Image: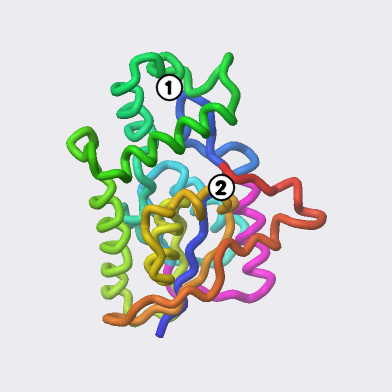
């Protein structure tokens, strides 16, 4: 049996022209996490990461903080869903939203308003009524996350696996473990902190078992300035 530790990437650039870029705070978060796990003498046999830029930058920052050699592997199945495509599909259906989404909520629209519209866009994506509007429909995303777990079979000899990924795959992994409807993804996703840790017991051909969700003691107390959710 292996322990698989999922880490959410550091803070990205919400509202910017390019979201897929760590902010300076995001870099600090992953460096701090790597330093903490090194101090706790946590060992990892292998580190996986998605192929998005924020995953690569998070892995690099983590390694900087961890200060020990790590075997890094890229696995695109751990990538987040394309939130821009999901939002643009709603805007295509409701033309009055096109300018808003093109501006990503800046400068005249609040972050709260953008997030409310994003929740609507995700609900439309998950409904199944408009699958033809998406390059990756909702069922395909869920299947991709499950494929990411299946591909761990090639690493079955490793007992301590770290995965740097995003909120969507962490939420789907959690609900699959607990038998929750996958459509509740956003109810979990919106509470996942950047650099937060979720752990699972896993072995081939067996259901994964959730051990902990969204551990973030490393961004509390005197480190509370490192806490963020997007």
Q: Residue furthest bottom?
A: 1
- The residue that disc 2 covers is 10
- The residue that disc 1 covers is 101
Instruction: Pick whichever, 225 or 120, lies toward us.
Output: 120
Confirm or deny contact between disc 1 and disc 2 (CB under 8 A): no
Which of the two labelled residues, at mark 1 and mark 2, occupies the earlier sequence position? 2
* Percent of width and height locating residue 24: 63, 38
Instruction: Pick whichever, 182 or 134, lies toward us.
Output: 182
Q: In the shown orientation, is residue 99 left or right of residue 9?
A: left
Q: Is residue 141 above or below residue 173?
A: above
Residue drawn at point x = 75 percent, y = 46 percent: 225
* Percent of width and height locating residue 2: 42, 81
Q: Residue 175 falls in which quadrant of the image?
A: bottom left
Q: In the shown orientation, is residue 139 left or right of residue 10?
A: left
Residue drawn at point x = 37 percent, y = 60 percent: 181
The local crowd at label 2, few if under 14, some if 14 to 19, many if 20 or more residues have their Cα within 10 Å, is many
For the N terminus, the image quarter is bottom left
Q: Is residue 58 above or below residue 196?
A: above
């Amino acid at each position: 049996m292996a322990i698989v530790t999922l880490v959410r990437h550091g803070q990205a650039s919400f509202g910017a022209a390019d979201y897929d870029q760590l902010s300076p705070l995001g870099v600090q978060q992953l460096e701090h996490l790597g330093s903490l796990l090194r101090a706790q003498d946590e060992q990892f046999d292998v580190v996986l990461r998605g192929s998005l830029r924020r995953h690569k930058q998070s892995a690099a920052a983590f390694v900087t903080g961890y200060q020990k050699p790590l075997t890094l592997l890229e696995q695109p199945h751990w990538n987040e869903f394309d939130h821009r495509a999901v939002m643009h599909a709603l805007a295509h259906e409701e033309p009055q939203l096109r300018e808003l989404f093109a501006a990503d909520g800046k400068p005249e629209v609040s972050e709260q308003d953008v997030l409310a519209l994003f929740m609507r866009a995700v609900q439309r994506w998950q409904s199944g009524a408009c699958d033809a509007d998406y390059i990756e429909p909702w069922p395909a995303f869920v299947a991709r996350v499950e494929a990411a777990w299946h591909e761990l079979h090639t690493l079955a000899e490793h007992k301590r696996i770290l995965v740097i990924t995003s909120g969507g795959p962490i939420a789907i992994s959690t609900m699959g473990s607990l038998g929750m409807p996958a459509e509740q993804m956003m109810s979990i996703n919106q509470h996942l902190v950047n650099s937060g840790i979720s752990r699972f017991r896993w072995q081939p051909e067996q259901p994964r078992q959730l051990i902990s969700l969204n551990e973030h003691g490393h961004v509390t107390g005197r480190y509370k300035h490192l806490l963020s959710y997007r």
